[in-house]
Image (spheres, grey):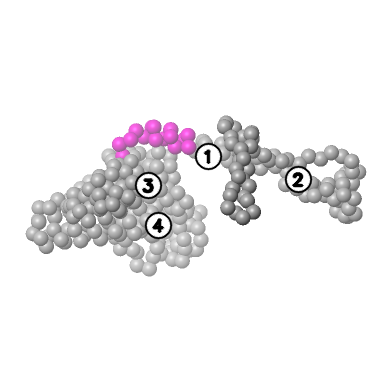
Amino acid sequence: HIAAYLSHLGIERRALSLFRQVAKAAPVQPEPYLFGLRSAQRLDDLDGIRWAVTGILSQAWTNDQAEVWRTGLRVAQATIERLKAENRSAEAQEFQKALDDAVARDCVIIVSWTGNADIDLFVEEPSGTVCSLRSPRTTAGGVFLGDGVSRMGQSALAGGNSEVYVCPKGFDGTYRLLVRRVWGDVTAGKENVDVSTHYRTKNAVQVRKKVPLENNEALVVFDLKDGRRQEPLAEHQIANAAVAQLAVNQQVLAQQLAGAADTRALRDYALARQALEGGNNANVNPLFASVANAVGYQPVIITLPEGANLAMNAVISADRRYVRITAVPM
């Protein structure tokens, strides 16, 4: 917000610097890159434009953020064409190399199939996180793109469907892919699974095979070596385990609270009121009717003041010209 306000005031250079600082702290947020790109374009700052578009293209964006990817790609292509038109070949080559490095991916999984059917993907990462439709972005860097083949620079299967998982920078270790048929029939009962490691690099390895669906599921396991995620894997696993345990504790607590609450309490309270008031309702519990002089309790929620408090009474004169304010001791 501060950087956007600086940009609004015309202090673009300072705003761009602040956008770059924010992007380091929150690299998966699109706003620093998008707003920083606008500031860089206003300044005609080639280095700022390169930072913004490479920042956008180096990340994988979910379906609801697909326009972020398209914006970065359009500006990148337009910038390269402009540099070539101005005979700035060296800068164009340097810019192109930065883009090639940005679109590299440690892991890409594409599952495609034909037939009137729907298939779900679940990818378990080495840190223990699971990327799926319900959790499209994980703390380990995995992103579920849905039908995002075009964003990977590939054409979709003719007459078919696809689901895509991408991890721009992943941990070394074993990845487990679970493919599950939700409904419908897959042609020949098999789907195509493409697993690419070090995608768009000189060390790229691609494995493609047809996997049969047994009991509506199929499991594919592969290893990633030389992943670019530099954080200690063990620390990430411990952090995820702590988050998972907290979620389990909250669910258990919610179940205990739900079990302790009596859903019949409001009904019984209403019937007791009718019995005490002498009503002749046939639904009145005889137990309530026999205790007409019993004492009942109804909770009353109040606010207990804490710290310094001051209350005031205001009285407005009849002609609405004066207001008398009196302090009320607490």
Residue 273 can be seen in this image: yes
Asked if residue 249 is positioned above or below residue 52 in the image, the reply reads above
Q: Magenta region: which residues?
A: 229-243
Horizontal and vertical percent for residue 2?
A: 33, 46
Question: Which SS class for mark 1?
Answer: helix
The numbered mark at residue 247 is 1
The reply to whether the magenta stretch includes residue 231 is yes
Front tag of 3 and 2: 2
Q: Nearer the viewer, residue 138 or 293?
A: 293
How far, Cα to Cα, is label 2 from label 4? 44 Å
Q: Amino acid at mark 2?
A: Ala
Residue where numbered disc 2 is placed = 265
Q: Which badge, 1 or 3, comes first in the chain's sequence? A: 3
How far, Cα to Cα, is label 2 from label 1? 29 Å
Q: Amino acid at mark 3?
A: Gly
Horizontal and vertical percent for residue 117?
A: 47, 63
Q: Which badge, 2 or 4, comes first in the chain's sequence? A: 4
How far, Cα to Cα, is label 4 from label 1? 26 Å
Residue where numbered disc 4 is placed = 64
The residue depicted at 56 percent of the width and 39 percent of the height is 250
Q: Main secondary structure of the magenta part?
A: helix
Badge 3: residue crowd in 10 Å (few <14, some 14–19, many ≥20): many
The numbered mark at residue 142 is 3
Residue 77 falls in image quadrant: bottom left
Front tag of 4 and 1: 4
